[in-house]
Image (cartoon, rainbow, N blue to C red):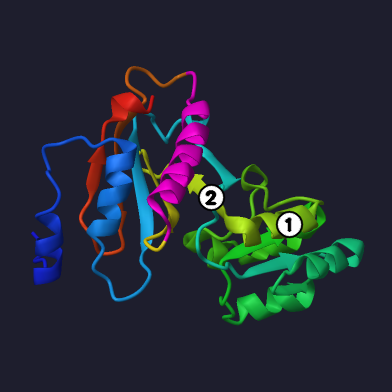
Amino acid sequence: MPKHGKKYLEAAKKVDSTKLYTIDEAMKLVKETSYANFDASVEVSYNLSVDPKQADQQIRGSLVLPNGTGKTSKVIVFAEGPQAEQAKAAGADEVGSDELVEKVQNGYLDFDVVVATPMMMAKVGRLGRVLGPKGLMPNPKTGTVTMDVEKAVKNVKAGQVEYRVDRQAAIHAAIGKVSFTEEQLAENFKALRDVIVRARPAAAKGQYIKSVAVAATFGPGIKLNPLDLN
């Protein structure tokens, strides 16, 4: 068992581990239990009754949170011609083609999101070993492989988050910062909840959301009642 410091233990005393909190209670408590000396992120974790090994039970997508993420993401775009100009105008941090592929191959990874036009994916595919393990590979399901690069870049800058079920049938995503109001966090939480509920695969049986919890960076987990979310 990992050892926790005094600050964590003090924060954990505020959380009843046997209780399933409402959304409003959880958002209030996640702010109270944050002890980091920076504006910590608030993250939500879902455990779902799906089998990620089955193609028809994989869940992946993206959404722009109503109140953003509190973070300005750096986005690079692989595009040429008019799409490259649109990406630059939309605020992309870097736009390019072969030269950008080479730059990433040589170790450049100072970005959070990668967008590409469909015709660029043959070239971007060469970066699979670099981008894949970091979850940065563009994908049509998350809106990062598109001809509308302007919209993609603006969505990222506006606070778009990606969600994806992992091998343990869990989804982890940030829904804001501790500096957000309780209402802003609750609104962002509900927006993510709604898309996850709508994404329920037909093959999923029983209680779809098995458990859900929120926590600030380094903070204790706060469990919510999954029966209120399905």
Residue drawn 72% across the image and 69% down it: 92
Question: How far across and how far down the image is residue 167, in percent?
Answer: 37, 43
Residue drawn 48% across the image and 61% down it: 133
Residue tagged 1 = 121
Q: Quadrant of residue 39?
A: bottom left
Q: Which residues are magenta?
A: 180-202
Mark closest to the chain's N terminus, 2 or 1: 1
- Asked whether 100 or 208 is in front, the reply is 208
Q: Secondary structure at mark 2?
A: strand
Residue 135 visible, this orientation: yes
Question: How far across and how far down the image is residue 11, in percent?
Answer: 15, 60
Vertical placement of 107 versus 193: above or below? below
Question: Which amino acid, by three-letter code, is at mark 1?
Answer: Met
Give me the C-alpha separation between circle 2 and circle 1: 19 Å
Instruction: Sort mark 2 into few (<14), some (14-19) or many (20+) by Cα contacts within 10 Å.
Output: many
Vertical placement of 97 versus 82: above or below? below
Residue 192 lies in magenta, yes or no? yes
Is the C-beta separation of discs 2 and 1 under 8 Å?
Answer: no
Instruction: Sort mark 1 into few (<14), some (14-19) or many (20+) by Cα contacts within 10 Å.
Output: some
Residue tagged 2 = 162
In the image, is 82 to the left or to the right of 221? right
Question: Which amino acid, by three-letter code, is at mark 2?
Answer: Glu
* Quadrant location, the N terminus: bottom left
Residue drawn 33% across the image and 48% down it: 27
Question: How far across and how far down the image is residue 162, in percent?
Answer: 53, 50
Question: How far across and how far down the image is residue 68, in percent?
Answer: 55, 55
